[in-house]
Image (spheres, rainbow, N blue to C red):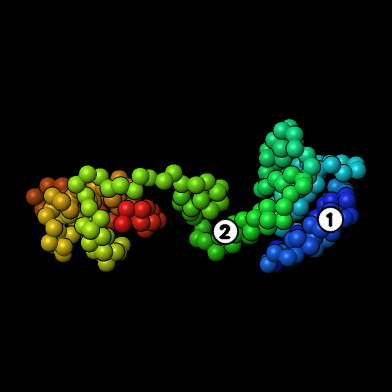
Amino acid sequence: MIQVLIVEDDPMVAELNRRYVESVDGFQVLKVVQSVDDGKEVLKTDKIDLILLDVFMPGDNGLTLLSYIRELGLSVDVILITAASDIETIQSALRFGTIDYLIKPFTFARLKEALLSYKQKLEFLEFHPHQINQQELDERLLQKERMQPTHELPKGLTKHTLNLIWAELKAIGENEFSTNDIAKSTGISRVSIRKYLNFLEEIGVLETRVSYGTIGRPISQYILNEQNSIAISDYL
């Protein structure tokens, strides 16, 4: 359960935000406070995962709490929910690492989107292996849309033949193979096979390793790059 702290000086807004948050599965509002100082006290005693933070409040404003969290290196994430729409405040919030910024008045759909996006990121980090590749970082954590290729194969290549070769590569799995290996198993000429393997290497699906035979001639050995194998789906 994701533990949430709401820091909002308007009791009616705070209550509305609490209801919104607790209507989303996986979230629980642990406490609601009306000032930055009270928020600091909660952080000293309770394990908070996420703060919904206003900017304009009596005493210190919300950016002060955001700065305090970063200075102490606390493992707390922050979504700003505020009427502050000026560029200076938004830039400051982003520099302090707020994960989202909602300008009042906002819709429940927008808040729900922010919460679900946050939840998905947490789940991804919790259940994913220790390392991720660039595509996963962009799409799952930084929410960047991958630039879509044209999805057109280079001239002379066909989807039918690519599917035949791809089936063989999946059967081979993590083992190394050569152009000759695929030519023998598919009945396709080595010249044609080489074109397809070169293409798969270009899009990152294959890696090449050069070895030397008994007579010293270099032989290209290929191996499947499992992390980037999803790239071929655009062309099948």
Q: Say which amino acid is labelled 1.
A: Ala
Q: Residue at x 21, y 57 (%)?
A: 161
Q: Nearer the viewer, residue 102 or 76?
A: 102
SS for callout 1: helix
Q: Position of residue 236 (x, y in %)?
A: 31, 57
Q: Say which amino acid is labelled 2.
A: Leu
Instruction: Compute the Cα span from label 1 to label 2.
Output: 29 Å
Split into 4 quadrants, where in the image is the N terminus? bottom right
SS for callout 2: helix
Asked where in the image residue 45 lies, by quadrant, the reply is: bottom right
Residue on which the image places disc 1: 14
Question: Position of 52 compared to 200: left or right?
Answer: right
Q: Is residue 232 above or below residue 93?
A: below
Q: Nearer the viewer, residue 215 or 8?
A: 8
Q: Residue at x 12, y 61 (%)?
A: 187
Q: Position of residue 76 (x, y in %)?
A: 71, 53
Q: Residue at x 66, y 48 (%)?
A: 99
Q: Residue at x 87, y 41 (%)?
A: 60
Foreground label between 1 and 2: 1
Residue on which the image places disc 2: 125
Q: Nearer the viewer, residue 64 or 120?
A: 120
Question: Position of 215 compared to 219: left or right?
Answer: left
